[in-house]
Amino acid sequence: MSVPLYQAKAELFRTLGHPVRIRVLELLQDGPKPVRDLLVAIEVEASNLSQQLAVLRRAGMVTSYRDGPLVVYALSAPDVADLLAAGRRILGAVLTDRDGLLDELHADGRDR
């Protein structure tokens, strides 16, 4: 029995629900990176990064391969970068709307 589409989508968004995972995906937008470079850029414990990379790999958002002694990670598809860009746009719109509402409240003067 297959999982309903809405449930699969919810799982995808749960996968994005961790700051380290988001940061990894952002860094991989520039191209494949070895784990050591991700560790330097993110500054988390190696075990924590390993756990988060495993979650992303199981979700199909990243792939990994060996390049000699290095394990290299890459985005599984360009759509992952598109999803992050959409998230930035949505966040920007939400924050802009909140700033506008706050300005309105202050201009009204009744919230003081």
Image: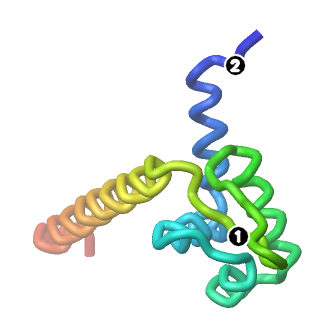
Q: How many marks?
A: 2
Residue 25 locus on image (x, y percent): 56, 64
Displayed quadrant of residue 102: bottom left
**Rendered position, 5 above or below 63:** above
Q: Residue at x 24, y 69 (%)?
A: 99
Residue 82 locus on image (x, y percent): 39, 52
**The residue positioned farthest toward the front in the image shown:** 68
Dot 1: few (<14), some (14–19), or many (≥20) neighbours within 10 Å? Answer: some
Question: Please, what secondary structure does the residue beneath circle 1 have?
Answer: strand
Q: Residue at x 76, y 46 (%)?
A: 58
Question: Please, what secondary structure does the residue beneath circle 2 have?
Answer: loop
Q: Tag on residue 104?
A: none
Foreground residue among 21 and 10: 21
**Rendered position, 92 above or below 55:** below
- Which amino acid is tagged 2? Val
Q: Residue at x 11, y 72 (%)?
A: 107
* Residue contact at pointers 1 and 2, CB within 8 angstroms: no
Query: Disc 1 designates what residue?
Result: 72
Displayed quadrant of residue 36: bottom right
Dot 2: few (<14), some (14–19), or many (≥20) neighbours within 10 Å? Answer: few
Question: Which one is earlier in the sequence, the residue at label 1 or at label 2?
Answer: 2
Of marks 1 and 2, the one in the foreground: 1
Foreground residue among 4 and 98: 4
Going by the image, does 97 lie left or right of 88? Answer: left
Q: Tag on residue 3?
A: 2
The quadrant of the picture occupied by the N terminus is: top right
Residue 109 locus on image (x, y percent): 16, 72
